[in-house]
Amino acid sequence: MYEELFEKNKVVPVVVIKEIGDTVPTLSAMIAGGVNVAEITFRTACAADAIRLGRETFPDMLIGAGTVINAEQCERAIAAGAQFIVGPGLSASVAAVCKAHDIPYLPGCITPTEIMQALELGYNIIKFFPAGVFGGLKALKALSGPFPQVKFLPTGGADLSNLKEFLAFDKIVAVGGSWMMKGDIQKNCQDITDLLKE
């Protein structure tokens, strides 16, 4: 599943759905922009419903849950159909739920200690967040020295100005972010489509 997630998807949009009615227009705009993956954040009241609706409406799209911080949220996200789970930090209880359901989990790690904890739990693909605050590409290259087996998904600090530079580093499987999701869904989805194409 990790291979499926990252082989064709080098950009993983972080998607905030505030109203369930925004789900289909948002995901449609993303597909029109050439992106077939969405990390729907689990920090809004309708997140689980948005994941469920997205999976039903776009069965060929990879839809996961982001900002998952505990086992209860993880269970709800998976029950809604989430195909992968992303956390802002590392949670052993979330990891246990994902392993029980055979669902990919990308824990958020910044420090060498956190990376070692992720490795002990069996994870060598991690989210590096917030990348811009914690040293960006320079930090990732430094961390790759003691952890050559680790691959990273940097999020928070990547945008069109440095996207190619991030993706050129072979320890980066993909780049996450929300910079391409700035369009106004209520008025016009074309902004999202155009940013994703760019």
Image (cartoon, rainbow, N blue to C red):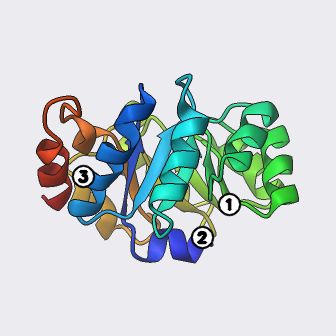
Q: Position of residue 130 (x, y in %)?
A: 44, 34
Q: Is residue 183 left or right of residue 108?
A: left
SS for tag 1? loop
Q: Which residue does the image show at 13% across and 37% down from the upper left? A: 188
Mark 1, residue position:
104
Camera-nearest residue between 85 and 33? 33
Do tag 2 and tag 1 residues touch (Cβ < 8 Å)? yes
Do tag 3 and tag 2 residues touch (Cβ < 8 Å)? no
Disc 2 crowd rating (10 Å Cα; few below 14, some 14-19, many 20+) is few
CA distance separating discs 3 and 2: 24 Å
Q: Is residue 175 above or below residue 191?
A: below
Mark 1 is on which residue type?
Answer: Pro
Quadrant in the rendering for residue 131: top left
Residue 88 in view of the camera? no
Q: Is residue 157 left or right of residue 195?
A: right
Q: Which mark is in front, 3 or 1?
A: 3
Q: Is residue 39 above or below residue 146?
A: above
Q: Position of residue 47 (x, y in %)?
A: 55, 33
